[in-house]
Image: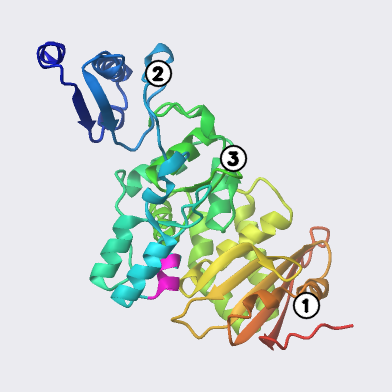
Amino acid sequence: MLRKIYVRTGRQFVVLLDEWDCVMRERQESEVLQKQYLDFLRNLLKDQPYIALAYMTGILPVKKYGQHSALNMFWEYSMTDQKGLEEYTGFTEDEVKALCRKYDMDFAEASNWYDGYMFRKYQHIYNPKSIVESMSCQKFSSYWTSTETYDALKAYIDMDFNGLRSDIVKMLGGDRVKVNTRSFQNDMRNFEVKDDVLTLLIHLGYLGYDAGTEEAFIPNKEIIMEFENAMSVGGWGEVMHVLQTSEKLLEDTLNGHADRVAEGLDRTHSEVASILTYNDENSLGCAIGLACYSARRDYKLVREFPAGKDFADVVFLPLPHTDKPAIVIELKYDKSVSAAIQQIKDRQYTQALEGYAGEILLVGVNYDKNDPNKPHSCEIEKCEIGNCEIED
């Protein structure tokens, strides 16, 4: 009929398909139905003279099925490759700053809740639905509702692929993980390796993706809460216990109780060691990120923070609503805590906090794997911004 109309009138059709991938998502178990659907789309749209434009939106890229991947007439834009549509994927940083001024909302808090999606040109893209809701309601909270429920997220992160659980723990601790997005079959059922699961989570919005470094990460506080919900029921007991006890470790850090902090890191490192697949300074950084999980209410955690003459291992930047001090953490492995504190001073890490006025805690942490009695040690020193003296 479309062809006949075109022959009779000479006018082409514009076809718009919203949620084109609903068959892939709602009929995950039926590959026969999915192939029939792809054949239908291909016969309807590809190389047809009556089609002027076909515009399809959905979560998943076009499904790959050998010859059935022949929907190759599309320009495809996705969460792993936005091409020229980066700035339209969400709100840009400038747009969010303008909205915060208009609605009298704190930009730093908005950034902590909703920033984090990172593209090649635009390094800060914000979830548009959550920004609109928070500005309208005058409250920062979790407004994002994925197409998939947190039960589905739990099913994905519980999958028994080698290294997947370790990668999830690393990202919860504020780290990033390498991911190969090219092996993904563009569906929600056929997974061969852990990278396929991670790539799906990127497309669903649960993970951010840095195309420059090919790394995945948990983008913001709102998404962290989704992971916490998904892990709260079975299978993640060690990690959940660490998260629940993180309040005490933060309190001990702020009060300068270095011995208690070292003891807390001992427990944390031991509890997550069964999941982590490595045992080095990166492992220690991950353990600290998890141990200080509750600090994200009042801080923005930054791993490998550019500071002074180098990069500080972990920095906790206080959010505007809190009067807590900034925290600069330097990690050492089989060395000493005094060397860690000295490095913070020598390399002038605190200079990067000059826009911040107030107290800074310098925290040195060392992990000694060869000492069976006290593998973790800690030293905490307080100073004021501009007055963190460099020792001879």
Tell which circle, 1 or 2, labels the residue nearer the N-terminal end: 2
Q: Measuring 37% from the left and 53% from the top, which residue is drawn there? A: 90
Residue 202 location, quadrant: top left
Q: Which of 105 and 156 is in front in this view?
A: 105
Q: Measuring 30% from the left and 18% from the top, which residue is drawn there? A: 38
Give coordinates of residue 326: x percent, y percent. 59, 79
Q: Measuring 52% from the left and 56% from the top, which residue is drawn there? A: 172
Q: What element carries label 3?
A: loop
- Residue 27 in the image: above or below residue 256: above
Q: Is mark 1 on a helix, strand or loop?
A: helix
Give coordinates of residue 296: x percent, y percent. 49, 69
> Mark 1 belongs to which amino acid?
Lys
Pointer 3: residues within 10 angstroms few (<14), some, or many (20+)?
A: some
Q: Name the residue under label 2.
A: 69
Residue 163: numbered disc: 3
Q: Which of marks 2 and 3 is in front?
A: 2
Q: Is residue 94 visible?
A: yes
